[in-house]
Image (cartoon, rainbow, N blue to C red):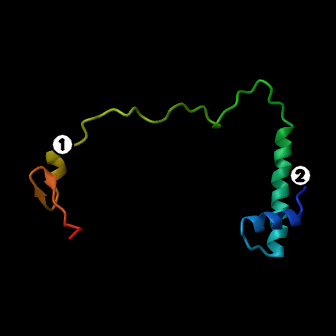
Amino acid sequence: MADISMDQVKHVANLARLAITDEEAKMFTKQLSSILEYAEQLNELDTTGVEPMTHVLDLKNVLRKDEPKEWITQEDALKNAPDTKGDYFRVPSILE
């Protein structure tokens, strides 16, 4: 089922509310047929015993643990602020 017709491409474009010209439909027909042919080639591979995966690399959790750390002191954070009041930044009011 690698072949896709130009009418099918136009139908899908219409469903997606995309206006395509006959020239574009012809180009997409060729491209989609190539993609389907490649997918069929992949279906011919023997994947018996191959574990399903979600990524090509064997990555585990790459995020660091969400642990609180001493980042910056409040004094350091406020030292370059243009305006402060006590332990807080002062900013212009946006509500009247």
Mark seen at residue 2 = 2
For the residue labelled by badge 1, is the local secondary structure a helix, a strand or a loop? loop
Q: Is residue 81 left or right of residue 64?
A: left
- Amino acid of disc 1: Thr
Q: Position of residue 54 (x, y in %)?
A: 64, 36
For the residue labelled by badge 2, is the local secondary structure a helix, a strand or a loop? loop
Q: Position of residue 74 (x, y in %)?
A: 17, 45
Other residues around mark 1 within 10 Å, as few (<14) / some (14–19) / many (≥20): few
Q: Position of residue 11 (x, y in %)?
A: 82, 65
| Image quarter of residue 46 | top right
Residue occupying the point 13% across, 46% down: 75
Residue occupying the point 86% across, 44% down: 40
Q: Is residue 85 above or below residue 13?
A: above
Residue occupying the point 22% across, 43% down: 72
- Amino acid of disc 2: Ala
Q: Position of residue 93 (x, y in %)?
A: 20, 66
| Image quarter of residue 65 | top left
Instruction: Answer whether labels 2 and 1 touch (C-beta < 8 Å).
Output: no
Mark earlier in primary sequence (2, 1): 2
Q: Is residue 27 above or below residue 67?
A: below
Q: Is residue 75 left or right of residue 58?
A: left
Q: Is residue 44 above or below residue 77?
A: above
Residue to which mark 1 is pinned: 73
Considering the image in quadrants, where does the C terminus appear? bottom left
Q: What distance separates the C-alpha of mark 2 from that of mark 1? A: 63 Å
